[in-house]
Image (tube, rainbow, N blue to C red):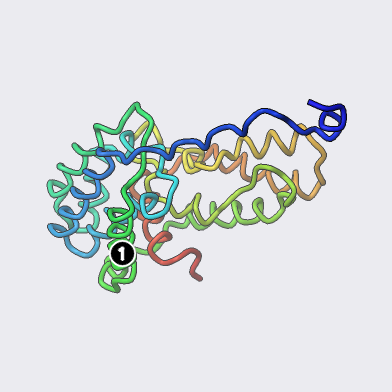
Amino acid sequence: MSLLDRLLGRSSDPPPPAADPPPVDDGLEQWVVTALQACADLGPAGRLVVAVLGESLADPPSSPWFGHEPTASGLADLLGALGEDPARTEPLLAAEAGLAGRRLGVLSDSTRESWRATVQAVLRDPAAIAALPERDQRHREAEQVWRTAAARVQPWRAVQLDPDRALGQVRWYPGCDTRTFIGYSDPLGLAAVQRSVQEHRFSDEEWQALVPVEELHRHAVHPLAWRLSSLAFAARGGPRG
């Protein structure tokens, strides 16, 4: 290599090979097949539950919680509260159990397109939304705190808060007695945002906006009420009223 090349940071080494795309995941493919069958067996509200549980498969990346949530009891309680038969989703839980404890691949393009169309159709179904109760007041309060904090985090930070996704994905919310704190509704890593703000330059406005979120996460919530409210948030497209 010439001196000029070294000064300009050029390299004579060949460029690294492109990374291989993730493989199509047969387990995720089977989850979609089973979810479509569950949707056919359930009423409008039940189809909405299944669609939101698989929402992250419509557009990557897939939820890392596949295989861990929902719990059988949490899902049964949710469906029962909506007047649906929990037994209809037992094959779906069985399909998901095989996804635990391993790295997930991706869906084939055709399966993803089919699933995306299904999710969109369910979310547009007025009968599904009409079956949902009003949102829980604790959930509304959490949303306001979250949005305030998200708006105050400075845009140049590598970590940000996304209240739409954090409050809209029912899969992330408490589904059993050991997960009853609002802190479990933090899929995007609020702790990482707090550390980033605390350890680096921050404005007083930014820091003060994060203090209520830290306090909020100490509050316990009723698992079923929180999941129902999260489902309503996801289905109705965010904040209402």
Asked which secondary structure carries label 1, the reply is helix
Q: Which residue is located at x 38 percent, y 61 percent?
A: 232
Q: Residue 188 placed where, x, y %?
A: 54, 42
Q: How many marks?
A: 1
Vertically, is 145 above or below 123? above
Picture quarter containing residue 198?
Answer: top right
**31 and 43: which is toward the camera:** 31
Residue at (44% x, 36% y) in the render: 20
Local crowd size for mark 1, using a 10 Å CA cut-off: few (<14), some (14–19), many (≥20): few
Q: x, y (%) of residue 29?
A: 25, 45
Viewer-proximal residue, 219 or 129? 129
Q: Quadrant of residue 8?
A: top right
Q: Position of residue 47 (x, y in %)?
A: 23, 59
Q: Nearer the viewer, residue 133 or 43?
A: 43
Residue that mark 1 sits on: 117
Q: Quadrant of the N terminus?
A: top right
Disc 1 marks a residue whose amino acid type is Ala
Which quadrant would residue 135 be assigned to in this image? bottom left
Residue 122 vs 170, above or below: the answer is below
In the rendered view, would you say 201 is above or below 141? Answer: above
- The answer to which of 22 and 11 lies nearer the viewer is 11
